[in-house]
Amino acid sequence: GQQLNQSPQSMFIQEGEDVSMNCTSSSIFNTWLWYKQDPGEGPVLLIALYKAGELTSNGRLTAQFGITRKDSFLNISASIPSDVGIYFCAGLISGTASKLTFGTGTRLQVTL
Amino acid sequence: SAVISQKPSRDICQRGTSLTIQCQVDSQVTMMFWYRQQPGQSLTLIATANQGSEATYESGFVIDKFPISRPNLTFSTLTVSNMSPEDSSIYLCSAGTGLKGDTQYFGPGTRLTVL
């Protein structure tokens, strides 16, 4: 099945740094979701985006729904050790019975 | 939001056997889904669990291998049948309302190891 391309694949950053990651697709999506997955856990929803151009924040996290509807961005400001994990984007196309297409994931490591 | 629980959280099974995974949602939801996540990989949709009718399977997944039940709006099971080591994965249940502006919430996953 189709997957969304996420970049970077992995990141090693120092505590306090800002992080940016993005997700791109050849298809248009109507909803973009960002999840974080910790080892041994299921994905936890971070931010949901429903409209092209929408910019939404959740604490230190900010995500944007790209104007073309083919991409989305997630930024984390002032990273802390608990930000470690894998971040997945997921897209939803209207009329597809709510089936999500997941990105390839970005693995974030934070060093002290 | 919905809170989703799964049982078992993990299991180690012998090849050729079957395992049934349970998923319970704390509220009535329209949509329930089953995903597989192989080690180090992203999530792949196995099927949509339809209440009171046969599940809708994605390409590459078949009912004989992954039978799914959904007897009501809050509960579903996934069986991994005739297991082989290639079935070793995390199996995840998700749920949502299916309405416009919906999101999906995930269970904690079932980590399956097949020897």
Image: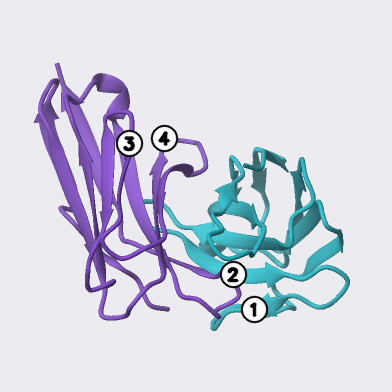
- Mark 2 surroundings: few (<14), some (14-19) or many (≥20) residues within 10 A: many
Gap in angstroms between the C-alphas marked 4 and 1: 27 Å
| Alpha carbon separation for disc pair 3 and 1 | 30 Å
Decide: marks 1, 2 in contact (CB < 8 A)? yes
Q: CA distance from mark 2 to mark 3?
A: 24 Å
The three-letter amino acid code for the residue at tag 4 is Asp
* Colour of chain B as rendered: cyan
To which quarter of the image does residue A80 belong? top left
Q: Amino acid at mark 2?
A: Ile
Q: Colour of chain A?
A: purple
Nearest the eye: A1 or B100: B100
Which residue is located at x 26 percent, y 41 percent? A62
Question: Which structural element holds mark 3?
Answer: strand
Q: Residue at x 55, y 79 (%)?
A: A96
Q: Are marks 4 and 1 on the same chain?
A: no
Q: Label 3: how many residues lie within 10 Å, few (<14), some (14-19) or many (20+)?
A: some
**Label 4 crowd (10 A; few <14 / some 14-19 / many >=20):** some
Q: For mark 3, what is the residue?
A: A85
Q: Are marks 2 and 3 in contact (CB under 8 Å)?
A: no
Instruction: Tell me whether circle 3 and circle 4 mark residues in contact (CB < 8 Å).
Output: yes
Q: Chain of mark 2?
A: B
Is residue B17 visible in this depiction of the protein? no
First along the sequence among labels 3 and 4 = 4
Q: Is residue A107 left or right of residue A1?
A: left
For disc 2, the marked residue is B46
Q: Which residue is mark 4?
A: A38
Whole-percent x and y of residue A45?
A: 46, 43
Which chain does the numbered disc 4 sit on? A
Helix, strand or loop at label 2? It is strand
